[in-house]
Every structure is written in structure tokens, then in C-alpha cells.
Amino acid sequence: MYLTTEKGLADFCDQLNSSPTLAIDTEFVREKTYYHKLGLIQVSDGTHCAAIDPIHISNLEPFLNLVRNQNTVKVFHAARQDLEILHRLCDGVIQPVFDTQIAASVVGWGSQISFAKIVNKVLGKKIDKSETYTDWCRRPLSERQIEYALDDVRLLFPVYENLIKVLKRLNREEWLQGEFIPLEDPDNFKAPNLEKLYMRIKNIRTLAPKNFAIICELAQWREKEAQVRDCLAKNIVRDESLLELARKAPIDSEGLSRIRGLHKNEITRSKKNILAAIQKGLNLPLDQIPKLPEFEIYKAPPGIEEMLSALVQIRAEKLEIEPSVLADRKKINDFVKCFDQKLSLKNHPLFCGWRKQAIGNQLYLALTGEIALAIGKNGKLNNFSIDSDLKKSTREDFPS
């Protein structure tokens, strides 16, 4: 079903009002714009299925009310960009959310598995990829394009149902508790913090304090301008040119014209605002200039991280999931740092939720010398308890 009228949308959404689960997908274009250009919304409750045309339908409230309903599970695959769009439209909390890509990772189907691969695994079907690079904002859409888009939710629903069965069979339903929290937190979909934009620019640590103050102001100006123009920030002024502006701190149009990469049309359009940002940075008192966070790379004692990575590999093989899903190298490094510097592990990602039992406790016991690694008679790497107390890994007196 292809919906192009407000009445058609309202009637369709009435059918879905009591649905406990909705599979949702969006099609959009974002190569040159600051915000996603929404071209199509697909939704299915397992029985009814439709593609909603947001270009023809200006009032999407009937659908958005379904999304806002906290009694309905919203199912996506690789949900972040879809949710970024929906958060802008809904202007509120969207929960509960279920991401089949994340769920697939905890049942051992691979980290960041593609939709095509997960459909092939579950349903044995190969997805037609002929419309992958369609401009979804161009009209009219062909029947083939609409059917291609609808398959994204037609097939997503049975994938979700199959994943639920696998999670139950493996007793890993609780593993997902906490995994979707970032997707349900509206703060993660807000516009970037203008006062922290300088963190995205390389080589800012080479700037003197006053020049650093300038780039902070320039980065804010550029982002606001990108939002107003609905274009990519780099299409206004590239990072390299922004850095040069901060270093040279020109005070007039002639000075701006000497900055490599700063287009003359942009100078004509924005010279007043650019010069004002530079001047504001120059005038900022030293004690008000933002402080860069300390750049610290923790180096664990030789062999420690390698040993813990081997332990993660052992546990991952036993649980039949990818090691990176269990604990990637960055989390291992941070875990060792917290242990070494006697920092609290209470809220560490490897000491929270399912990962604490799956790997966090074992990592802690390895660091305290209570378990060790060895090559067994089978030629494989194994972990064993130093004092043969096999119940150590489930004890209750781990640190907080």
C-alpha cells in the first residue's frame, strides 16, 4: 500500500492503533544537506504494510502518534539514522525500541550484520539491491521502487520474530536490557553542542590560546550557518581553512581573501560574521577560553591487555559471539586503567548488565591473579582457576 493522502494515512494508522509491535524503516537523502531529506516511511505490524509519502502528506501526526505510543515496540534494523529523523519529527521520547542489528550481535550472528545478510540467514531470501542508490525524494516513485522499500519492513517483521525465539532459546533476553538505552535517550539525538564543536577539528592543539578561542567562535558560526542553509558545514568552510582563519586572525576582507580554501563568494556573503567571530575570540579573556580535555593515552603494563584479549576470545568462543561484542580493545584498556588506578568499576560497561557475568568478573579475577590462561592438551587456549575453586567466577564479593 502506497499512501499519498492524509485521509489514507489516518485510516491506515487507525488499523495499527492496537498493534503491540511495529516494524519501521525510512528512506532519505543526505549527501548535501545538514538534515535528512525524508523521502519515504515504511511501516508494518506483520499483517498490514504501507509506504507513507511524506512529500505528498504534510501532516504525519497519525503515524507519529503510533511512534510515540509507549505500549508499542518499534522495531528497526540499524536504528540510529531512522531514529534521528523520527526524533526531529516527534520532538519527544521514542520507546520502547528494538534494533535487530544489536539483537543479532548478542545471539552470535555477527557484529553490525547488514539487513541483507540477516534476511538471508533467517528467511533464506536474497534482497534485490537494484534500488540502493535511488533518490527517494524524486517523484514519481515507480511501483518497483515502492515494492523494494516495502520489503524492508515486510521482511523485518519475521526477522524480529525469529530473533525473539532465538533470544528465548539461548536465555539471552535479559542481555538486551540496557543495550537499547542509547537509542531511547532523546539527548543522543539532539543537535550538537555548539560550545564543543571545536573537538571535531584536527590539529587544534597546535593553536595558541587566543587562536584557539577564535576557532571555537568560528566553529559555532559555521554550524549555525549550516543549520540555517540546511547544508553540510564543510561546504561553507572546510576544517583546514577554518584552522587557517584561526591562525592568521585576519581583520578585514583583504586578509580573508588570503586564506586558502575560503571561497570569494563565501567572503562576500559572510565576511561580517566571520570577522565578528574572529574579533570575539580575540577579545575573550584568557580565563574564559575553553579548556581542552587532557589528552591521555593509558598504557597498560606489557602483556596485560594481550592476556585479557585472549581471555575475551576464550569467553567469546564459549558464548558463540564475536569478541568485539563482548569487549572491544578500547573497553579492555579502560578496564585495566580503572583497576590499575583503583577507580570504581561499578558503572564500567564491562561491569554492568550481562557483560559483568559474561566477561567482567573473569577479567577482574585475571587481574587479581585468581585465574590464569594456559594451552590445554587439546592445543587450545583455556582459562582455569589458580586454587581450583571453579565457583570463583560467580562469587558475590566483586568490587563496586
Image: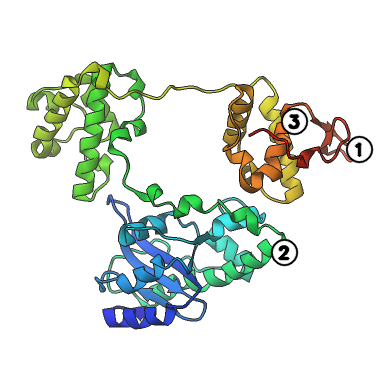
Label whose residue precedes the other's in the sequence (1 or 3): 3
User: Badge 1 local density, few (<14 within 10 Å), some, or many (20+)?
Assistant: few
Note whether 33 is above or below 149 in the view shown: above
Residue indicated by mark 1: 377
Within the image, what quadrant is residue 292 found in? top left
Measuring 69% from the left and 29% from the top, which residue is drawn there?
306
Label whose residue precedes the other's in the sequence (3 or 2): 2
Measuring 16% from the left and 26% from the top, which residue is drawn there?
280
Using the numbered discs, state the Cα–Cα distance from disc 1 to disc 3 in whole angstroms: 21 Å
Residue indicated by mark 3: 366
Which of the pair 158/22 is nearer the observer?
Answer: 22
Measuring 55% from the left and 60% from the top, which residue is drawn there?
100
How far across and how far down the image is residue 109, in percent? Answer: 64, 56
Secondary structure found at label 3: helix
How far across and how far down the image is residue 155, in percent? Answer: 53, 71
How far across and how far down the image is residue 97, in percent? Answer: 49, 60
Label whose residue precedes the other's in the sequence (1 or 2): 2
Q: How is the image coloured?
A: rainbow
Determine if residue 258 is in view: no
Left or right of 214 on screen, residue 319:
right
Note whether 278 is above or below 34 in the view shown: above
User: Badge 3 local density, few (<14 within 10 Å), some, or many (20+)?
Assistant: many
Note whether 299 is above or below 149 in the view shown: above
Type of the residue with mark 2: Arg
Left or right of 366 on screen, residue 386:
right
Closer mark to the observer between disc 1 and disc 3: 3
Left or right of 354 on screen, residue 114:
left
Residue indicated by mark 2: 169
User: Badge 2 local density, few (<14 within 10 Å), some, or many (20+)?
Assistant: few
Assess whether mark 2 and mark 1 are in contact (beta carbons under 8 angstroms).
no
Quadrant housing the C terminus: top right
